[in-house]
Image (tube, rainbow, N blue to C red):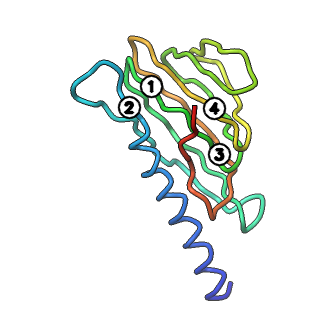
Amino acid sequence: MTRRTRRKGLLGTLTLLAGLAVLSPTVQAQGTTEAPALKRTPLQQADFPDAGHASILMQIDVPPNFTVARHTHPGIEIGYVLSGTATLSVQGQPERTIKAGDSFLAGEGVPHVIHTGPEPLRIISTYVVAKDKPLATPAPQ
């Protein structure tokens, strides 16, 4: 591996991590004075399917009575609900309630939003995304 290849890989990883930070301000609590926080925990990452993309396995913890603002990803997200329930709206799909044992797919650039109910939501998601773009970008209504 050349120095230039390592540098490109590092820049891509830093861009993805910056994207995680960018999404945090777009996540807003509904009806509270103290804003609880969405927590994303990267579990594993690999340059796959090629050097320009990353596959990221991530645990996502969403507080109760919380809205994850409408956003997109520069690739696909495949999610599996470990616990809790929420309403999931993915553009082009009917709105649905997701619960433990359910899975979902949000395609590249497809806006989606999650509203949790009275209990927290825990999801394991796999992202296959372009490394040179933020992991998540706010999407207009």
Q: Which mark sits nearer the N-terminus, 3 or 4?
A: 4
- How far apart are labels 1 and 3 at the CA level? 20 Å
Front one among 137 and 63: 137
In the rendered image, which residue does mark 3 sit on? Answer: 127
The answer to whether residue 11 is above or below residue 127 is below
- How far apart are labels 4 and 2 at the CA level? 21 Å
Query: Mark 4, residues whose alpha carbon is within 10 Å: few (<14), some, or many (≥20)?
Result: many
Residue 22, percent across and down? 45, 51
Secondary structure type for disc 3:
strand
Secondary structure type for disc 1:
strand
Q: Which mark sits nearer the N-terminus, 1 or 3?
A: 1
Q: Which mark is in front, 4 or 1?
A: 1
- How far apart are labels 3 and 2 at the CA level? 22 Å
Q: Amino acid at mark 2?
A: Gln
Image disc number at residue 121 = none
In the rendered image, which residue does mark 2 sit on? Answer: 28
Image disc number at residue 67 = 1
Q: Which mark sits nearer the N-terminus, 1 or 2?
A: 2
- How far apart are labels 3 and 4 at the CA level? 9 Å
Residue 87, percent across and down? 56, 16
- How far apart are labels 1 and 2 at the CA level? 6 Å
Q: Amino acid at mark 3?
A: Tyr
Query: Mark 3, residues whose alpha carbon is within 10 Å: few (<14), some, or many (≥20)?
Result: many
Residue that extends furthest to the left in the rendered view of this protein: 33
Quadrant housing residue 93: top right
Q: Which mark is in front, 1 or 3?
A: 1
Query: Mark 2, residues whose alpha carbon is within 10 Å: few (<14), some, or many (≥20)?
Result: some
Residue shown at the point (50%, 48%) measured from the top left? 42
Quadrant housing residue 72: top right
Q: Amino acid at mark 1?
A: Thr
Residue shown at the point (47%, 30%) measured from the top left? 68
